[in-house]
Amino acid sequence: MATKPKTKAETLAWLRTIAGELSTQTLKRLEDTLPWYGDMPPSRRSAVGLVAQAGISSFIAWFEDPRSTPWIAADVFGAAPRELLRSVSLQQTLQLIRVTVEVVEDRVVKDGGGPLREAILLYSREIAFAAADVYARAAEARGLWDARLEALVVDSILSGEYDDELPSRIAALGWHGHGEVAVLVGTAPKQLDVDHVRRAARHMHADVLIGVQGNRLVLVIGRSDPLGREPEESIGTSPALTFMEIATQLEPHFGPGHLVLGHEVPNLVDASKSAKAALAGFAVARSWRHAPRPVHADDLLPERALAGDPLARATLVHRIYRPLQAHSTELLTTLWSYLDNGRSLEATARELFVHPNTVRYRLKRVSDVIGWDATGAREALILQAALIIGSMSDYEHTPRRRPS
């Protein structure tokens, strides 16, 4: 004899009767089939169990009136603490939904009939979409928070105003840089694809912090792989790129105009020094007609010094003038004469009463000591600026004799 189909009211009453049994069976199957559930601490397992129970209760309410629960996620996931989203991935959540649906569906097929089975399949689809929406909203909120935090960190680096919380903020951003850091400043493009910039940096084993200030785009660059790797760790890997090589490959992501790379600094906390040099160079780069793109901030030392940049003046004195002065006054005098005589070997030799080959040898020694070659037009300008500012510095520090 055929069993008479249950009315909707009878089905609802039956579902409410077995709700507790379904919850118990769901928790048991979660523990039997999902290893990650059994490895959770008790508090997290309890929270996951609340989500499963809420899903069953919400299904019963939805079955009674599908229009009464327009936002299913609020019913189901509202029972879980907020930190559960951080410890349970979307994949694990979908596994949880699948197990819960399987338990309910097994019982429905056995005792509930076809219409109820169709209802649980429809509801499970809605729950899956709701779960994806919850995680999408969480990811969007996380992205907005990360963007604000990253802007705050970049602003702190550019201003040099640090506090004790800066390292923790950097860690919260997931910074993977090791060791040296350099800052790259250029014009922001009309449409900036931040993810594209990050992918390009990762391809070069680098990490970046990105900041947009008005029409300027600022990248704080660090290497993902430390330079001090053991030899066996470097087998089969390409050598680490220099910051200038990284900047050259990132150049297409900037808008038109000059692109300036600050000098290397030991770590991210000292990045403000590189940032100040890059910003100062960016402000005066237009005064060098044939400036390359990108250009190193130290190649703009004369322009920066003329613009009143104290860091450029100090760099010229301490990296060029003082080393030559300490090494040999003969080299310093030869360089002065060579530059004053329009970089003419013969004129310099006549002034110093030496052979032109002697002048050539001394200029090579100058290059060995400070790393700049006076025979190049651009580097000669840098060296002449260093000599002028260095001699001015000597005068400023010369003790004045008091009148008797």
Image (spheres, grey):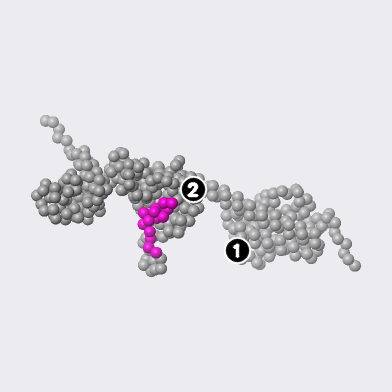
Identity of the residue drawn at 37% across and 49% down: 293
Q: Which residues are magenta?
A: 238-252
Amino acid type, callout 2 = Leu
Looking at the image, is mark 2 or mark 1 earlier in the sequence? 1
For image coordinates 55% across by 50% down, the residue present is 142
Residue corresponding to mark 1? 36
Say above or below: 234 vs 291. below
Categorize mark 2 by other alpha carbons within 10 Å: few (<14), some (14-19), many (20+): some
Q: Quadrant of the C terminus?
A: top left
Q: Quadrant of residue 63?
A: bottom right
Residue receiving disc 2: 192
Foreground pick, 122 / 171: 122
Q: Are marks 2 and 1 in contact (CB under 8 Å)?
A: no
Kindly state the secondary structure of the residue where label 2 is placed: loop
Give yes or no for residue 117 being in the magenta stretch. Answer: no
Question: Which residue occupies the foreground of this view, 132 or 61?
Answer: 132
Q: Name the spot of residue 78 as percent of width and height, x first.
A: 66, 50
Dominant secondary structure of the residues highlighted in magenta in the image: helix
Q: Is residue 239 magenta?
A: yes
Residue reaching furthest to the top: 404
- In the drawing, does residue 330 fall left or right of residue 2? left
Q: Quadrant of the N terminus?
A: bottom right
